[in-house]
Each structure stands twice: as C-alpha cells, then as structure tokens.
Image (cartoon, grey):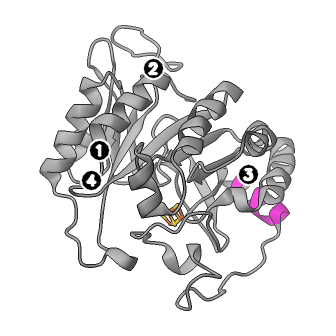
Amino acid sequence: MAHVDPVERKPFFHYRPGTPTVTLAAPGCSFRCHYCVNHRMSQYGRDQESPWTAHPVDTGDIVAQASALGGCVALSYTEPSLAPEMTLDLARQGKEAGVDVVWKSNGFLTRAAIDLCAPALAAVNIDLKSVNEVSHRRFTGGSARPVIDAIRAFREHGTWVEVSTPLIPNVTDAERIAQVLAEISTDIPWHLVRFTPAYRMRGQDPTSPSALAAAADLGRAAGLKYVYVERALGEAGRTTRCPSCDFPVVRRKVWSLDENRLVAGRCPDCGILVEGRW
Ligand code: SF4
C-alpha cells in the first residue's frame, strides 16, 4: 500500500515539518504486539486474519511521486527493516532526486543491520514500548535491549531519531522509559501514544488523557526537552516550545503543521538552537 500524508503523521515533529510523505507498508513484523492496530498487515504469516493483500510497487515511481510533491518517502505501519533492500533502493534513487527516506520502526535490529540501513535514512521514529525485559517480551515477543541500543546507534550514525511509546494503562512504566531516553539524550523528541483496544487486547480500557498528561510530566521531569501527546491534550500537547525561553516555536494541528517560527532551526525569541532537521 502507498499513500500521502504529512510527516507529522508518522510521527516526526523535528524533521522537516509539514513535509508531504509518500508512505509504504509491506506485510510482516519481527514483533507480535498484543495491541497492534495494524495486525492485519503486521502479523501476515502468523494469523489467519492477516492475509496477503499487498501489491508490488515500483520504487522509481514512488521516488518520482515524492519528488513531485517536494516530499520524502516513509516506510511505516509494519516493520521496514524486514526488507532493507527496498530502503537501499529507494535511498539510492532518492539521493539523485533529492528525496529522503525515513522509517517508523520497532528498533529490533542488529548492529550490522543498523550500519547497513542508517546511512540510507534521514530519520527514524523508533517505538520504545518498555525498558523492562519481562514486560517487553510479554507484550511484543522480543527483547527491549536491542531497541534501546538501536536508538543510540542510529543517533551515532547521524540519523535523526524520535521515539514513540504507547502508554498501556497499568503496564507502561513511563518514568523509567523517560529516564533511559534521557540517559541517551534529552534532545530526543518523545511521543506518548494513546493505547486503544485492538487485536488481543480488545477488552482493555484506552489510556485516559490524565494518564497521558502525567506521563508527559514524568518525561519532562526526567529532563526530556520535547515531550508530545498528539491529540488527547489539545494543541499544547503537540506544540514545540523553546527549551530555553519557552517560546512556542512550532505549532501543529492534528497530524499536520500549523506554523513553524524557527529561523534556521533557532528560536526567533532567544536564538537558541532547537535540535532537529528543520
Ligand atoms: S512493532 Fe508495531 S507493527 Fe510490529 S507488531 Fe508491534 S505494534 Fe504491530
């Protein structure tokens, strides 16, 4: 499948705000998260209710489409690292056309896979679902350690990294996750995602706005400069504020850019650099 939406939808908040993004997804994922909203695509090969519904795409057409829009190409919804040859091919053609390639990934990659793919990627949004091994294995089927290492490794490569965490009520330890992220860098944007009942967790309540607000406070208390909640806290939850003077430097609507007031990546009020790829 392929469609176009703003890069905020991936979500990326510190990478080229408002950029039209041609998004691709192929069936399959290295995790089997109990709450996967995309399970009909991600669990292909595991579940009978996840049939093969994909169609081949022409990477040249995809890059041309993104180029015509002045946009980028994203691989999302399932796990892009399962088909690194596609990323490399898109990046090779994108380089000639001035089109970036970005990922939404579960981060469950070896160092060799990161070394192969990171040079092809302008930005990666990695899901960090838990930093507790028992909880992570229980809900995803895989270990948390490689995911944490991947956040660090992609940053070492110079790929722009943002992190998303689905906040499962009474399960997700937001404070500990925020602390682990802050140990890597307080400049990493952290997206708190509302859990919605899906797949094998259809009976569980969704995350309340108050729980999202409390988790955002924990993120800021841990030292993270950029903590976001896309919808449940209104515009305030998705506004980038200058970490020095608190000026609102980027305002967003739901899943799109409203206003970017940064000047060459700097706050127009106090002049401090706001980390990102602006
Ligand atoms: S990592 Fe993402 S796509 Fe894969 S199973 Fe988990 S929620 Fe679904």
Q: Which mark is residue 67?
A: 3
What is the C-alpha distance between the residues marked 4 and 3?
30 Å
Q: Is residue 146 left or right of residue 174?
A: right
Residue at image coords 33%, 12% = 269
Q: Earlier in the sequence, mark 4 or mark 2?
A: 4
* Residue 42 is inside the magenta segment: no
Q: Looking at the magenta stretch, what is its main secondary structure?
A: helix
* Res 116 → quadrant: top right
**Image quadrant containing the C terminus:** top right
Q: Is there any visible trace of residue 198 in the rendered image?
A: no
Q: Amino acid at mark 1?
A: Asp
Which residue, given by chain and number where applicable, does mark 4 sit on?
A: 231
Within-10-Å neighbours for mark 2: few <14, some 14–19, many 20+: many
- How far, Cα to Cα, is label 3 from label 1? 41 Å
Q: Which residues are magenta?
A: 59-66
Ligand 1 has an atom within 8 Å of the beta carbon of the residue at disc 2: no
